[in-house]
């Protein structure tokens, strides 16, 4: 352990329950700072609902991948890598079953309204930014092969 993080080994900071709690506090606080913009974001989503006609393509790509390649690709160690080893939004609480995840759904939906706006604003500007968007999901615990799957989906919504 080469680096200390406020007196703790670096793997403590990256894999601990305290990190996940800190992540939630940071993201919720960031979203709450935008509370005045929530009404506008919901209005923007209503205006953009026409692009939902392309959602079956994205879901088709995802379903095709999950039913054909996922069982094989998930066994390749390098493609199975993710930063935390689980999805940061649900992973730590998914082991508690349905009731471990349910309390977080309302705040996650609220945060996704604002996160979606930022994604559309910054990550749909260029092909390079679509790639950055896809691989940024690694920091949220998404596996590498799932981040690779996000690339064509990101390009789909860049050009829609």
Image (spheres, rainbow, N blue to C red):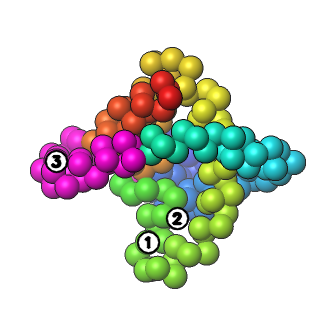
Query: For this view, does 134 lie left or right of residue 118?
Result: left
Separation of marks 1 and 3 at Cα, in angstroms: 24 Å
Residue nearer the viewer, 76 or 52: 52
Q: Which mark is residue 17?
A: 2
Residue nearer the viewer, 15 or 142: 142
Contact, CB < 8 Å: mark 1 with mark 3? no
Separation of marks 3 and 2 at Cα, in angstroms: 32 Å
Name the residue rendered at 44%, 64% in the picture: 91
Residue 94 in view (yes/no): yes
The part of the chain drawn in magenta is 56-84
Q: Which x, y percent locates residue 50?
A: 58, 41
Separation of marks 2 and 1 at Cα, in angstroms: 13 Å
Residue nearer the viewer, 54 or 15: 54
The rendered magenta stretch, by its main secondary structure, is classed as: helix
Query: For this view, does 5 lie left or right of residue 80?
Result: right
Q: Is residue 11 above or below residue 127?
A: below
Of pointers 3 and 2, the one earlier in the residue sequence: 2
Of pointers 2 and 1, the one earlier in the residue sequence: 2
Q: Is residue 132 above or below residue 22?
A: above
- Residue under numbered circle 3: 69
Contact, CB < 8 Å: mark 2 with mark 1? no
Of pointers 1 and 3, the one earlier in the residue sequence: 3
| Residue 153: quarter of image | top left
Name the residue rendered at 62%, 51% in the picture: 112
Q: Is residue 109 magenta?
A: no
- Residue under numbered circle 1: 94
Q: Which x, y percent locates residue 12?
A: 47, 55
Contact, CB < 8 Å: mark 3 with mark 2? no
Badge 3 element: loop
């Amino acid at each position: 352990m080469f680096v200390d993080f406020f007196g703790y080994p670096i793997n403590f900071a990256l894999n601990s329950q305290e990190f996940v709690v800190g992540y939630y506090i940071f993201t919720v606080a960031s979203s709450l700072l935008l509370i005045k913009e929530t009404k506008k974001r919901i209005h923007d989503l209503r205006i953009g609902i026409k692009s939902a006609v392309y959602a079956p393509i994205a879901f088709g790509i995802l379903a095709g991948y999950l039913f054909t390649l996922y069982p094989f690709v998930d066994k390749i160690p390098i493609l199975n890598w993710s930063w935390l080893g689980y999805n940061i939004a649900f992973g730590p609480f998914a082991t508690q079953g349905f009731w471990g995840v349910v309390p977080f759904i309302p705040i996650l939906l609220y945060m996704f309204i604002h996160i979606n706006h930022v994604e559309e604003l910054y990550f749909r500007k260029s092909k390079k930014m679509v790639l950055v968007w896809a691989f940024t999901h690694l920091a949220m615990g998404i596996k590498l092969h799932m981040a690779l799957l996000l690339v064509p989906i990101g390009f789909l919504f860049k050009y829609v």
